[in-house]
Image (cartoon, helix red, strand yellow):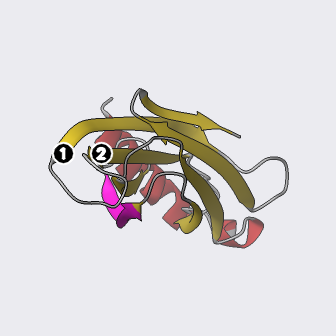
Amino acid sequence: MNKVKLFVLVLFACAIVPGAHAQTKAAFEVKVHISNHSNNCAWVTIYSSRPGLGWGIEKALWYRAGDSGTFKTAFPNIGIIQLPAEIKVRAEYVQTRDCHGGVVGDREGVKKGIFPPGNDYSVEVSATIDQSGVRFSY
């Protein structure tokens, strides 16, 4: 069974189970800490998704060399089913530290299977970017 059919089946099952939505929170939050450990400025795009669905852009912004920041996004639950979150971070490096010049590198990393631990409704993920790639950690 392909992922789209499975997703539709899960939606239908959740719709017919009375009171199922009351057993779980409406959403969980993912906080992504991004750190630019490169010597160059990078245009960073943060994407989010769920298994079997396409990527959506959450935010895109400049990160100068040495900059860091935190981004938060919510992932709604579907009835009693809590699907894992997926985060993708893409970094397009330019020639200088001050965000000028042409693109000299393009790296991305994907973190799949993100669930909040235990009964928490928030999870934190760190993404370290440099010219060699994007590395994730909890």
* Front residue (pair 32, 53): 32
**Residue 17 percent across, percent down from the top left:** 60, 63
Residue 125: image x %, image y %? 65, 48
Residue drawn where x is 84% and y is 48% of the image: 118
* Distance CA(mark 2)–CA(mark 1): 5 Å
Marks 2 and 1, the one that precedes in the sequence: 2
Q: Which residues are magenta?
A: 55-62
- Asked which quadrant contains residue 135, the reply is top right
Relative placement, left or right, of 38 versus 41 is right
Q: Amino acid at mark 1?
A: Val
**Residue at x 64%, y 64% (from the top left corner):** 29
The residue indicated by pointer 2 is 93
Please, is residue 73 above or below residue 94 in the view? below
Asked if residue 85 lies in the magenta stretch, the reply is no
Which residue is at a point 35% across and 42% down the rendered structure image? 52
What's under tag 2, amino acid-wise?
Tyr
Quarter in which the N terminus is drawn: top left
Q: Of the numbered discs in the image, which one, if any, rests on residue 41?
A: none
Nearer-the-camera pick, 131 or 138 = 131
Reading the image, the residue beneath label 1 is 103
In this picture, residue 104 sits left or right of residue 115: left
Identify the secondary structure beneath mark 2: strand
